[in-house]
Image: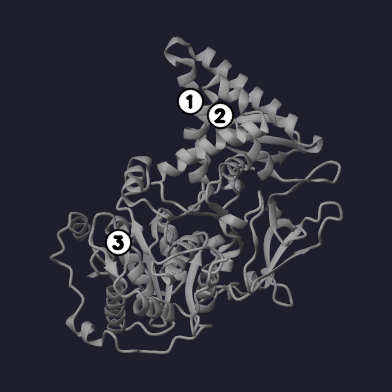
Amino acid sequence: MAIKENLDILTLKELLYNSAEKYADNIAVTFIDKQGITYKELLEKVEETSAFLRLNGIQPGDKVAILSENQPNWVISYFAVTTMGAVAVPIMTEFSATEIHHILRHSDSKVIFVSARYLEKIQGARIDDLQTCILMDDFSVVPVDFDRALLKSVINGSRKELSKIKNAALKLAGKDCCEVNEDDLAAILYTSGTTGHSKGVMLSHKNITSNAVVLTGVVDIGVDERLLSILPLYHTFEATCGTLTPMLKGCTIYYLEKPPTPAVLMPALKKIKPTIMISVPLVIEKIFRRKILPGIEKNPLLKRLYKFGALRKKINKKAGAKLLEAFGGKLHLMVIGGAALPEDVEKFMFEAGFPYTVGYGLTETAPVSSGNSPSNIRYRATGNPLEGTEIKIVDPDPETGEGEILIKGPNVMKGYYRDPEKTAEVFTDDGWFRTGDLGFMDEDDFLYIRGRSKNVIIGPNGKNIYPEEIESIINQHKFVVESLVFERASRLLAKVHLNYEEIDGEMDAKKYEEPAIRDKIMSILNEIHGAVNDRVASFSRLHEIVEQLEPFEKTPTLKIKRFLYV
């Protein structure tokens, strides 16, 4: 077990000041191949920006939005807001302009930090409370009612029209404007953007900081670690696990200047040789299905040997070593969360001895509630409850022990912003948070997740059918990209989006007419149908598999929007 970092006060201000004092000359945040910002410099920039916000009328409790891709200035903005007692409102960049405007209104944001890349999304916003728009790229000020000519000049790099941070702000820097308390609101995070579904999760300083502190005692992190950030910072998972926790230990966090496509990511991994990474399952799954499995499937001997447990483990060990080398060869911690890790992908990682760990939590729990170090993982489990966090299963099934997961602890949110009714719905009378997830705990208090309670399908015999488990089996097929299982007219169906490029490659499509290609696709769907039904319980068998021609529409956290298809 790693040694837990301690803070006298559980606030983001205390976290930053603590790290700036202990690791002053360490590089805190940086773009690859760019001049890094040390912890001492980070604190100075945060104080300057906080002073500028104060000059622009921002007071403790005021809301300040952040809309930007990952970059060092995102971190500066976040700390500048929270360390002065104001409230950060990180916004998902994938949201539409309409959704973003709604969030700005709903949150009562008075200032927004926005990067040039997303400046157009706030153009034309008629928001009474919004007073100041700050360009994230260089902390210059953009008029709130800017026009297209100004927008074009900003994007092209000409900012003559923009006024820089005033010298007076620098004079205020370092002067403590207010006291920040543990129970003060630190951030509001919107899990959706439309008017009808807005849920602004309110997280206090204690919620966020306690989670970051506890995690330093779960995983082994040293002062010389290099973390490559590939998940968006507006995601609580990346903000807490990929920023605050490593900063408590004086680590260096690297950001990409372009989206993490393979063409961008692979050279970055080779150059940085990260020791820590934070990822969602989809990233690992794509690598496994596109890089690892094809190498096994295309070799007839390996394909046969892979069916035998002992031999499969040896093959996975060798493949795992190659995968580790692809990540730069120095990785000792891959933290995976945000969604369920497919069973076959985890089996590969587990048998390969890949240094991964899986955790569980929600935005409402800041976010981690259970987890373990790579040396203490249990296959298919999401770890033990974190220190100070309680987890219990209510109304468990007498046969399986499965029931709804409830959580209580310092990481559990204050509630939903301006929505006492929704807040009351998710809390029990004695203060337990209802997650809406189903799972069970074994005799050693390892937590296992079965799925969302609202997704569960009750079979004709009264048995619970978990769509996520069937989808995990479907997705193991080499031609499947993603799938969705649902019930319609008492029949269990699945929609499947196929990898048409792979199918064309196998068929050498130039030699085939369209009818032959369609026959091949129907053959694949029938093959999947039979293979799945051979592996699931009788009451979970699929009646039909339907081809989904287009990729499923997803949330910003890469989960399929199930409600659009069922």
Judge depth for marks 2 and 3 and give the one in front: 3
Image coordinates of residue 46 in percent, x first then y, are 31, 76
Left or right placement of residue 161 versus residue 380 in this view: left
- Secondary element under disc 1, as helix, strand or loop, is helix
Disc 1 to disc 2: CB gap under 8 Å: yes
Q: For marks 2 and 3, give the CA distance.
A: 38 Å
Q: Position of residue 230 (x, y in %)?
A: 41, 53
Q: Give the class, few, some or many, for how many residues have Cα within 10 Å of label 1's Cα (few <14, many ≥20).
A: some
Mark 2: few/some/many CA within 10 Å (<14, 14-19, 20+)? some
In the rendered structure, which disc, 2 or 3, sits on the residue that comes first in sequence? 3
Is residue 334 at all visible to an observer of this figure?
yes
Amino acid at circle 1: Glu
- Place residue 351 in its image quadrant: top right
Disc 1/disc 2 C-alpha distance (Å):
9 Å
Q: Nearer the viewer, residue 151 or 209?
A: 209
- Callout 3, which amino acid? Thr
Give the quadrant of residue 61.
bottom left
Location of the C terminus (image quadrant): top right
Depth check, front residue: 207 or 434: 207
Residue drawn at point x = 19 percent, y = 79 percent: 166
From the top left corner, tell me how far across and down residue 251 is, in percent.
38, 65
Q: Earlier in the sequence, mark 1 or mark 2?
A: 2
**Is the residue 553 above or below the residue 531 in the image?**
below
Look at label 2 and name its amino acid: Lys
Residue beneath disc 1:
502
| Residue tagged 3 | 30
Which residue appears at 27% of the width and 67% of the height?
37
Q: Earlier in the sequence, mark 3 or mark 1?
A: 3
